[in-house]
Amino acid sequence: MAENKTIPTKLSVTAFINGIDDQQKRRDAKKLAAMMRGATGARARMWGPNIVGFGQYHYRYASGREGDFMITGFSPRKQAMTLYIIPGFKHFGTLMGKLGKYKTGKSCLYIKRLADVDEEVLKRLIERSVQYMRNNYETK
């Protein structure tokens, strides 16, 4: 069975965030890190070379595949800041309607900059997604 390629590393979160070239993206990353730490109560860890993750949960699929992954996290990509809202967005329709300017993938929220969204709504979205994960999965 294939191993999960995105795993926790010993890389420095502080060095990663401080190494973000774009000053605005670096400020946004620091704010996101604070929001996610507040929501999870967990210290940031690097997951692979460029994802800052918080907390951890264990998943098990019907196929028998299982593993561990972060509860929430973000990555400052070139095109947009990618936030990992692991349960997806179907449970958070009201919040999504109030969030602001964004795009989504299955579990990814893409925003150009924090100024494009309502930060309080984003904070609630992160908190509710973390609570969903804790209510539905074995978490650390």
Image (cartoon, rainbow, N blue to C red):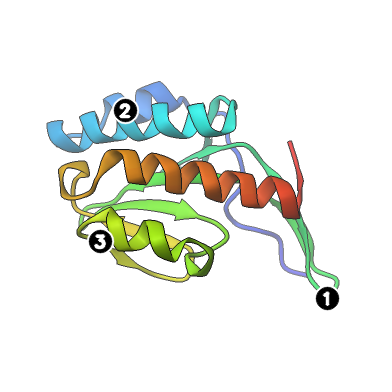
Q: Residues within 10 Å of mark 2 (few under 14, many from 20)?
A: some
Q: Which mark is residue 88?
A: none
What secondary structure is marked by label 2?
helix
Is residue 69 visible in this depiction of the protein? no
Question: For the point 40% across and 26% down, which residue is it?
Answer: 34
Q: Quadrant of the N terminus?
A: bottom right
Which residue carries the number 3 mark?
102
Residue 132 lies left or right of residue 93; in this view the side is: right
Question: For the point 16% across and 42% down, which residue is it?
Answer: 115
Which of 73 and 116 lies nearest the eye of the viewer? 116
Give whichever of discs 2 and 3 has the lower sequence position: 2
Marks 1/2: CA–CA distance: 37 Å
Q: Quadrant of the C terminus?
A: top right
Q: Position of residue 15 (x, y in %)?
A: 36, 23
Which residue carries the number 1 mark?
62
Q: Indicate whether 54 appears above or below 126.
A: above
Question: For the point 85% across and 71% down, which residue is it?
Answer: 64
Is disc 1 in contact with disc 3, using a CB cutoff of under 8 Å?
Answer: no
Residue 38 lies left or right of residue 42; in this view the side is: left
Which of 41 and 131 lies nearest the eye of the viewer? 131
Q: Residues within 10 Å of mark 1 (few under 14, many from 20)?
A: few
Which residue carries the number 2 mark?
30
Identity of the residue furthest to the front in this view = 94
Marks 1/3: CA–CA distance: 32 Å
Give whichever of discs 1 and 3 has the lower sequence position: 1
Residue 60 position by quadrant: bottom right
Q: Position of residue 7 (x, y in %)?
A: 61, 46
Is disc 1 in contact with disc 2, using a CB cutoff of under 8 Å?
Answer: no
What secondary structure is marked by label 3?
loop
What secondary structure is marked by label 1?
loop
